[in-house]
Amino acid sequence: MAAIWAQVLGLPQVGRHDNFFELGGDSITSLQVLAKAHREGLTLTPKQLFEHPTVALAAAVAVIGSVDGTPPLAHEQDPERIVDVELSDEEMENLLKEIG
């Protein structure tokens, strides 16, 4: 996350407690950050970035590995996008092994 912020803001480095907006970030650059983070497999909403403007805080609320555009918080998800699937016992065991 810090590397993305540094790249978008044109800075040599960004620390984990640096405030995005105090570093010169604004609404336009925040969207650039979110797009780059999304491509790297980090999902963060604009609201989350505004409410958690440091790398440490933003990283704490970002969802890792969700690159399909699904909102990160369950209460923000559209119920129409949630699909029930049936898994066999073997498939369930394999899935649990994969996710640890």
Image (tube, rainbow, N blue to C red):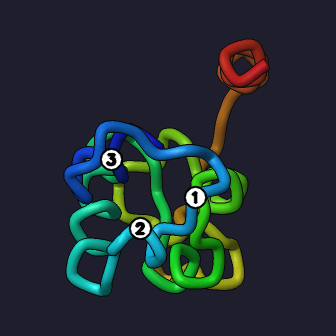
- Residue placed under numbered mark 2 in the picture: 23
Q: Which secondary structure lies at badge 1?
A: loop
Q: Are marks 2 and 1 in contact (CB under 8 Å)?
A: yes
Answer left or right for 49 relative to 57.
left
Q: Could you classify mark 3 by the number of other residues whose Cα lies within 10 Å: few (under 14), some (14-19), or many (20 or more)?
A: some
Q: Which secondary structure lies at badge 2?
A: loop
Three-letter code, disc 3: Ala
Residue 59: percent from left, percent from top:
62, 51
Vertical placement of residue 22 versus 54, above or below: below
Vertical placement of residue 3 versus 77, above or below: above
Say which mark, if any, is on residue 6: 3
Three-letter code, disc 1: Asp
The answer to which image quadrant residue 74 occupies is: bottom right
Residue 33: percent from left, percent from top:
31, 61
Seen from the viewer's position, the closer of residues 90 and 18 is 18
Three-letter code, disc 2: Leu
Instruction: Residue at 34% x, 74% y: name it.
Output: 25
Task: Specify which label sits upstream in the sequence, 1 or 3.
Answer: 3
| Viewer can see residue 74 | yes
- Residue placed under numbered mark 1 in the picture: 18
Instruction: Residue at 46% x, 43% y: name it.
Output: 2
